[in-house]
């Protein structure tokens, strides 16, 4: 297996792409076995080097551009998220604690840390570049935060905690995927009376994928949200919404509640071992926000006007429901249905009229065109093997220079976890030779029947632009060290490039060019476009409340005593802030993957809003020039944000672009809540 294993061979493929057509599930285990062994040998060679520590023999050596682990893990992690199966899930459960153990071995290697600390203490005398100094400081900080200064029982305990947290995160993710994969609601054509054709077509395609007669509503957001918007059947809306809200909370083997409770307890213990009062104090220390109090202040400054707007909207929707002869309170499965009716009435917008103008292929062309106009990038579609037949790839160039390979994987399927994300098979670096990135966007849009164009909602198109903003952050990266390349920045800064890029979708000239009718190829009428853009902030009270509630629960989980019953704590927090009864958290705790599938966004779900304060202000810089594609502003944006990675602290990067940090007023104005 080893000699025939493509993961262990040189990739003599165009752009050194993974040879997806040759990689089989059985190749991963032996490849990881060798990767673990090579990584341990490489670290031992650095740590045990008898020469005095230098930047080259320590930091540069750690930045191994030929790491087998990076190569194998890059392929496995992406495929196991986007096209998993029981074999890969078993291996993922086996690997997660081993990865955690290896990371602990590295960061708690006393000899290795001693070399880093020696360089760190002498950094002012080493004649380092600004980037080298930044990388050294981050290595030192990250090793300390990973327990490098712990000794004895504390060190052993932290290792055990990290391994167990890795197991819990993997189990959480797989349980959530199982619940999403296994539930569906089979419908007859009459059950979809009153629903637009695009929803019926998507439901038919979902049934076909599952080899079921008729129509199916699944828990994919691209199916369930339009069903909740358009179905006049309140009983079916309630059934679907309840299943959506109960993911991870259904009892049995896929229930996540015990995992959440144990995760919170272990995170708290981890933070205290490292000298912090709470996990939020630990987690926020290196972020822009810095402290839980600053996060809470931001969220509450937005919460109060958002809740007021949502309460006012709820009164209107309740009256609409009463006019339909339905007594009682507005329920969560009613909100989207009556909000859509209200949007249609007040803004004369019909989703069935709008959606044909948002073809997936046209919106992909739009995101590429904006990148061409802003950054001079060009895109050429490639014909090569990928990990799934629905995935597509493009070479990205600028002035003839290869910049990246971009992969787009856009359609929902049972083997893919929910949501949308950007990842990479390979990151950018220049140490030891230029290495350009292979970046992937993964979405979960509803797939149209064969022969028909796949249509997006305007929100779907926004998601497409959002994830491509992350991809640009990776593809435009221009630093020496992979440790700080692309999206390797503060968590509450990483959403700035993605959320900022969303703004170009709403530029009228972009939509006038690319929003073309799927059947007639006519551009979106100016009057319809005007109504669409006028309604952009419609229902922002609802959207902001469901988001802020999730962020506030996340913060409470990690600033207060770990709860024995996380759902009781969730209820207490929502009661404390006065959560409207007809709105639920965007991500209830048992399916809050941002926070519990790993600790990437733990104590950090606020990050989207923190970044939104900046993205509103950053796009205003273009608006002030009178040109959304102003070349000088675009050059500054690339230089200071998109290409800079983590080469400077996030606040410095932003100030270099804009001159100063913005206040929350920009966000409130952008959401229509000022």
Image (cartoon, rainbow, N blue to C red):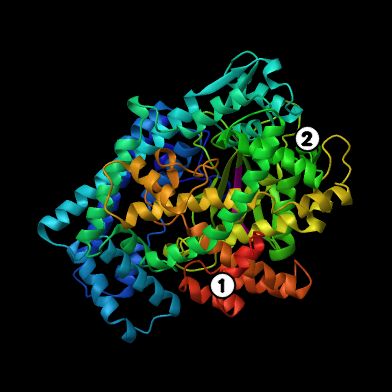
Q: Which residue is mark 1?
A: 663
Q: Is residue 24 visible?
A: no
Q: Which residue is mark 2?
A: 352
Query: Which of the pair 224/64 is nearer the observer?
Result: 224
Q: Position of residue 508 (x, y in %)?
A: 80, 57
Dominant SS of magenta comes to: strand
The answer to whether 480 appears left or right of 540 in the picture is left
Q: Is disc 2 in contact with disc 1, using a CB cutoff of under 8 Å?
A: no
Residue 325 sits above or below residue 434 on the image: above
Q: Position of residue 151 (x, y in %)?
A: 13, 62
The segment highlighted magenta reads 401-408
The answer to whether 251 appears left or right of 663 in the picture is left
Q: Is residue 355 visible?
A: yes
| Quadrant assignment, res 391 | top right
- Residue 496 magenta-highlighted: no
- Residue 407 magenta-highlighted: yes
Residue 653 sits above or below residue 587 on the image: below
Query: Which of the pair 159/237 is nearer the observer?
Result: 237
């Amino acid at each position: 297996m080893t000699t025939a294993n493509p993961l262990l061979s040189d990739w003599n493929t165009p752009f050194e792409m993974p040879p997806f057509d040759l990689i089989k599930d059985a190749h991963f285990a032996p490849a990881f076995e060798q990767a673990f062994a090579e990584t341990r040998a490489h670290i031992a060679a650095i740590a045990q080097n008898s020469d005095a520590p230098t930047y080259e023999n320590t930091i540069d050596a750690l930045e191994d551009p030929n790491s087998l682990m990076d190569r194998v893990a890059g392929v496995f992690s992406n495929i196991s998220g986007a096209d998993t199966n029981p074999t890969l899930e078993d291996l993922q459960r086996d690997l997660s604690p081993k990865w955690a153990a290896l990371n602990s071995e590295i960061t708690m290697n006393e000899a290795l840390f001693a070399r880093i600390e020696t360089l760190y203490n002498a950094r002012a005398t080493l004649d380092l570049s600004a980037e080298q100094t930044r990388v050294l400081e981050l290595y030192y900080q990250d090793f300390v935060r990973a327990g490098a200064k712990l000794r004895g029982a504390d060190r052993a305990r932290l290792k055990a905690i990290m391994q167990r947290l890795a197991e819990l995160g993997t189990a959480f993710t797989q349980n959530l995927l199982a619940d999403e994969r296994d539930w569906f609601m089979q419908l007859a054509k009459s059950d979809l009376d009153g629903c637009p054709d695009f929803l019926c077509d998507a439901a038919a395609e979902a049934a076909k994928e599952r080899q079921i007669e008729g129509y199916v509503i699944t828990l994919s957001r691209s199916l369930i949200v339009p069903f909740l918007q358009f179905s006049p059947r309140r009983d079916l809306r309630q059934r679907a919404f309840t299943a959506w809200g109960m993911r991870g909370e259904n009892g049995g083997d896929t229930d996540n509640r015990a995992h959440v409770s144990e995760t919170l307890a272990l995170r708290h213990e981890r933070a205290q071992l490292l000298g912090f009062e709470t996990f939020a104090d630990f987690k926020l220390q290196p972020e822009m926000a810095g402290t839980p109090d600053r996060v809470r202040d931001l969220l509450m400054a937005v919460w109060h006007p958002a809740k007021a707007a949502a309460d006012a909207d709820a009164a209107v929707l309740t009256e609409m429901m009463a006019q339909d002869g339905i007594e009682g309170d507005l329920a969560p499965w009613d909100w989207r249905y009556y909000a859509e009716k209200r949007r249609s009435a007040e803004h004369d917008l019909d989703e069935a009229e709008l959606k044909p103008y948002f073809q997936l292929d046209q919106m992909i062309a739009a995101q590429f065109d904006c990148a061409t106009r802003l950054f001079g990038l060009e895109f050429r579609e490639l014909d090569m093997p990928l990990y799934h037949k629905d995935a597509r790839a493009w070479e990205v160039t600028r002035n003839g220079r290869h910049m990246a390979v971009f992969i787009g994987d856009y359609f929902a399927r049972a083997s893919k976890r929910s949501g949308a994300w950007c990842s990479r098979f390979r990151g950018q670096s220049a140490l030891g030779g230029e290495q350009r990135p292979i970046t992937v966007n993964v979405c979960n849009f509803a797939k149209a029947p064969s022969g028909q164009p796949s249509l997006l909602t305007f929100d779907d198109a926004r998601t497409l632009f959002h994830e491509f903003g992350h991809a640009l952050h990776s593809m435009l990266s221009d630093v020496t060290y992979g440790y700080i390349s692309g999206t390797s920045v503060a968590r509450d800064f990483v959403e700035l490039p993605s959320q900022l890029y969303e703004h170009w979708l709403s530029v009228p000239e972009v939509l006038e060019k690319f929003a073309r009718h799927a059947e007639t190829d006519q551009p979106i009428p100016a009057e319809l476009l005007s109504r669409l853009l006028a309604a952009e902030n419609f229902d922002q009270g609802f959207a902001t409340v469901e988001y802020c509630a999730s962020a506030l629960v996340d913060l409470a989980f990690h600033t207060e005593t770990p709860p024995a019953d996380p759902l009781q704590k969730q209820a207490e927090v929502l009661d404390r802030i006065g959560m409207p009864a007809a709105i639920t958290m965007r991500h209830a705790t048992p399916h809050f993957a941002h926070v519990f599938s790993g600790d990437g966004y733990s104590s950090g779900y606020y990050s989207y809003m923190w970044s939104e304060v900046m993205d509103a202000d950053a796009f205003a810089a273009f608006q002030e020039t009178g040109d959304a594609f102003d070349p000088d502003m675009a050059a500054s944006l690339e230089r200071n944000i998109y290409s800079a990675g983590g080469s400077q602290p996030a606040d410095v990067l932003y100030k270099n672009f804009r001159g100063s940090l913005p206040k929350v007023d920009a966000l409130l104005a952008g959401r229509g809540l000022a």
